[in-house]
Image: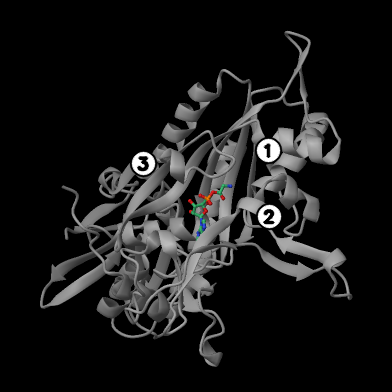
């Protein structure tokens, strides 16, 4: 049995608001349901997640390229892709209180809010509609994209022509997507505006199964390598009835969120559905010339599609920890250093000169290397707690002895162990520790200062 998540959603939401990770959108007006704003720490965490993904799937690979397509696309795209007809959820309405629900998520046939009788389900399209230009008429209707994927399909030929990539190769894209979900909730898990990190990997038909398995494993490992506990991840295959209209096969990578197991990422085999549809709808060939056989083929597509916001939520849930510390509870985020919003905090023991001058000098030296925070408010104990709670892996303390021996202490978030090193060695030492070196591997002139 897997343990339930250590943190309740209420605790996590409270930490996120208190510390400036995530706020409700337009909060001073009472908030806008299902939309969220990332605060100073949230935006760093989100950027770090996107950067880690981009590095892993684009920059460190020869068979992938990136793209940033526009959110608004030609309306024909959504006819060809099947979204205008089939991107729907079954909606029911309560005949008493008029609240609306997703029929496939209800336990029985009564309103979850008042127990009232429900209408027969009808299909509700999730696409957000708007108008292009100053005239609001049917001819000018455009849609906010419900997935970033289509931008990659319609650019397939552009990419082949300009990059000379040969099969198998993929395109990666990060960007906003919009869905007019019938029900939202569980904080940033299901919202109406969210961000995706998607890969469309084009392969020769017949090799699709092999590539599907390859990407499933790659994507699982990506989460684990960035600190998600293996036992909090599971694979779940979609049943025939669940498959999206374009998918031949799909597995969800589920995470054990506080509300239970739920989809973090989907890996789908989309077959040749999208390229065939766009070729026939646009009249442009999207076939690929196989140089070995001299035959034109339509590639199959393997699609690992991850949610940025759900990744933020999963990394936060997984990192959250509480442990007894003297009479208190120490709350900490054991975030992987690559993802931590702040890598190093500089904490002068006092606000007096000349200590402040030395601490500022350390701050100025380290700032060009990483996201570093200077904090001189309240007691050192409270400052450590604050940094623990926002997931800062290392704190550097400059004390009165530093003025004499030119050394500073480095405190590790997870163990609270401390070492003392020459200030001239701080940059290299911290770099090595951020890359995973054991704290007690000491630089020249360094010493173990405190255990636990
Ligand atoms: N192109 C395929 C596609 O969009 P999906 O399973 O509908 O597939 C992919 O979405 C991922 O996008 C999901 O695994 C999830 O992480 C994220 N996602 C989808 N709908 C979302 C929503 N309403 N709010 C937040 N994230 C969402």
Determine the image quadrant of residue 421: bottom left
Numbered badge on residue 97: none
Is 260 positioned to the left or the right of 101 in the image?
left
Is 364 positioned to the left or the right of 393 in the image?
right
The residue that mark 3 highlights is: 236
Mark 3–mark 2 distance (CA, rounded to whole Å): 27 Å
In this view of the protein, can residue 412 be seen by the observer? no
Viewer-side residue, 126 vs 289: 126
The residue that mark 2 highlights is: 84
Mark 3–mark 1 distance (CA, rounded to whole Å): 24 Å
- Eye-nearest disc, 2 or 1: 2
Task: Please state the horizontal and vertical placement of residue 351, each as a whole percent of the image.
Answer: 39, 85
Task: Please state the horizontal and vertical placement of residue 239, each as a whole percent of the image.
Answer: 41, 40
* Residue drawn at x 32%, y 45% as measured from the top left: 233
Viewer-side residue, 451 vs 1: 1
Q: Mark 2 near ligand 1 (CB under 8 Å)?
A: no
Numbered badge on residue 274: 1
Determine the image quadrant of residue 286: top right
* Residue drawn at x 35%, y 75% as measured from the top left: 15
User: How many other residues sit within 10 Å of disc 1, few (<14), some (14-19) or many (≥20)?
Assistant: many
């Amino acid at each position: 049995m897997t343990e339930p998540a250590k943190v309740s959603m209420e605790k996590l939401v409270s930490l996120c608001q208190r510390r400036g990770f995530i706020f409700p959108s337009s909060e001073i007006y009472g908030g806008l349901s299902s939309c969220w704003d990332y605060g100073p720490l949230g935006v760093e965490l989100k950027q770090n997640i996107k950067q880690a993904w981009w590095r892993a799937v684009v920059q460190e690979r020869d068979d992938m390229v990136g793209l940033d397509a526009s959110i608004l696309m030609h309306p024909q795209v959504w006819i060809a892709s099947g979204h205008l007809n089939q991107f729907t959820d079954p909606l029911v309405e309560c005949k008493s209180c008029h609240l609306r629900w997703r029929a496939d998520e209800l336990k029985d046939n009564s309103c979850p809010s008042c127990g009232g009788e429900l209408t027969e389900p009808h299909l509700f399209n999730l696409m957000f509609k708007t108008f292009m230009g100053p005239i609001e008429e049917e001819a000018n209707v455009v849609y906010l994209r419900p997935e970033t994927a289509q931008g990659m399909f319609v650019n397939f030929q552009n990419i082949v022509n300009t990059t000379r990539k040969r099969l198998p190769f993929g395109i990666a894209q990060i960007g906003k997507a919009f869905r007019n979900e019938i029900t939202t909730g569980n904080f940033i898990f299901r919202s109406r505006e969210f961000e995706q990190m998607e890969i469309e990997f084009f392969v020769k038909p017949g090799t699709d199964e092999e590539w599907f398995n390859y990407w499933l494993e790659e994507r699982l490992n990506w989460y684990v390598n960035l600190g998600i506990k293996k036992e909090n991840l599971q694979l779940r295959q979609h049943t025939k009835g669940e498959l999206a209209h374009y998918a031949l096969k799909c597995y969800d990578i589920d995470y054990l969120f506080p509300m239970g197991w739920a989809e973090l990422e989907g890996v789908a085999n989309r077959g040749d559905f999208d390229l065939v549809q766009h070729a026939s709808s646009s009249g442009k060939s999207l076939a690929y010339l196989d140089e070995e056989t001299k035959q034109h083929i339509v590639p199959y597509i393997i699609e690992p599609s991850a949610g940025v916001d759900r990744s933020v939520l999963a990394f936060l849930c997984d990192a959250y920890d509480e442990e007894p510390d003297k009479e208190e509870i120490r709350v900490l985020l054991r975030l992987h250093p690559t993802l931590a919003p702040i890598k190093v905090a500089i904490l002068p023991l006092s606000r007096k000169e000349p200590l402040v001058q030395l601490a500022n000098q350390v701050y100025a030296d380290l700032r060009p290397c990483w996201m570093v925070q200077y904090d001189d408010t309240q007691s050192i104990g409270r400052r450590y707690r604050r940094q623990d709670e926002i997931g800062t892996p290392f704190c550097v303390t400059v004390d009165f002895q530093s003025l004499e021996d030119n050394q500073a202490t480095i405190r590790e978030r997870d163990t609270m162990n401390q070492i003392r090193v020459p200030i001239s060695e701080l940059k290299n030492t911290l770099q090595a520790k951020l890359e995973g070196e054991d704290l007690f591997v000491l630089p020249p002139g360094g010493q173990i200062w405190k255990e636990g």
